[in-house]
Image: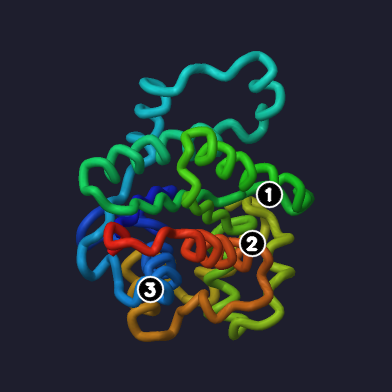
């Protein structure tokens, strides 16, 4: 089994080798419940940059039809990213003769007034992008409104009553933004290394959160994907 990951940058998914981010650690922990081992520890993963996805999409994905553009006018970014990651996952699977699981992390962002329909549309666009390339084990990971909400729930709010954080603005320039709230609680910048240290010490574990819809949907999708994987030797 092999993970193909893509995120926003260093502070969430991270980069390859020794510079993975906290979201990669969470993904690995969720998947290890099914696989029985850490794919990250054995090096069975690759992180794909946003630039690589963009270049793949431009090079290999034909423009949407006029009808398609209208249907996906707000979400085609998520759709095209998922299609590009799916293409790379198929290629990696053929190269390694392994089951490759693509996980696409993107913050939902949006304003405090954004409804859950917008978040659902973005997630559905990712699923549609995976499916059009016939990659049925793709996993969207879309914090609402952004990953700081999940981290705040764990570090500040003791994993409890966190759904309200999803209704706050994802704009870092807004008053009392989630980023500002997190850094105020920490007393310093929420860097990749700082958050990773919290994860490694057992002080930050988003898998313990039970009342955040966007996180629950991600964990449910992991369970769904693994329940449908063929029980064969090429998945290990």
**Number of disc labels:** 3
Above-or-below relation of 218 to 61: below
Camera-side residue: 118 or 221?
221
Sequence-wise, which precedes: disc 3 or disc 2?
Answer: 3
Q: Which residue is mark 2?
A: 214
37 horizontally vs 154: left or right: left
Sequence-wise, which precedes: disc 1 or disc 2?
Answer: 1
Classify mark 1: residues with Cα within 10 Å, few (<14), some (14-19) or many (20+). many
Where residue 226 appears, x then y in whole percent?
47, 64
Where residue 56 appears, x then y in whole percent?
36, 29
Q: Which residue is mark 3?
A: 32
- The residue drawn where x is 43% and y is 71% is 188
2 horizontally vs 54: left or right: left
Can you say which quadrant of the picture contains the N terminus?
Answer: bottom left
- The residue drawn where x is 74% and y is 53% is 112
Colour approach in the figure: rainbow
Camera-side residue: 16 or 42?
42
Classify mark 2: residues with Cα within 10 Å, few (<14), some (14-19) or many (20+). many
Distance from Cα at disc 3 to Cα at disc 1? 27 Å
- CB under 8 Å between discs 1 and 2: yes
Of badges 3 and 2, the one in the foreground is 3
Q: Which mark is residue 119?
A: 1
Can you say which quadrant of the picture contains the C terminus?
Answer: bottom left
Where residue 129 appears, x then y in whole percent?
53, 37
Sequence-wise, which precedes: disc 3 or disc 1?
Answer: 3
Above-or-below relation of 133 to 106: above
- The residue drawn where x is 68% and y is 49% is 119
């Amino acid at each position: 089994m092999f993970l193909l990951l893509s995120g926003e940058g260093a502070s969430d998914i991270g980069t390859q080798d020794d510079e993975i981010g906290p979201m990669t650690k969470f993904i690995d922990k969720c998947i290890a419940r099914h696989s029985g081992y850490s794919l990250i520890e054995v090096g069975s993963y690759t992180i794909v940059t946003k630039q690589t996805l963009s270049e793949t999409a431009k090079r290999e994905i034909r423009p949407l039809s006029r009808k398609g553009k209208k249907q996906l006018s707000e979400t085609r970014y998520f759709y095209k990213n998922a299609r590009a990651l799916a293409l790379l996952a198929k290629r990696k699977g053929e190269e390694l003769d392994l089951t490759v699981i693509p996980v696409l992390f993107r913050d939902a962002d949006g304003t405090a007034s954004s409804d859950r329909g917008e978040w659902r549309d973005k997630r559905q666009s990712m699923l549609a992008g995976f499916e059009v390339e016939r990659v049925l084990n793709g996993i969207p990971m879309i914090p609402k409104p952004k990953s700081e909400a999940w981290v705040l729930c764990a570090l500040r709010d003791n994993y409890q009553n966190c759904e309200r954080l999803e209704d706050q603005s994802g704009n870092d320039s807004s008053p009392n933004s989630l980023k500002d709230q997190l850094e105020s609680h920490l007393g310093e910048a929420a860097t990749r290394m700082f958050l990773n240290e919290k994860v490694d010490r057992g002080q930050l574990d988003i898998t313990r959160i039970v009342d955040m819809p966007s996180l629950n949907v991600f964990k449910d999708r992991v369970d769904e994907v693994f329940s449908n994987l063929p029980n064969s030797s090429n998945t290990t």
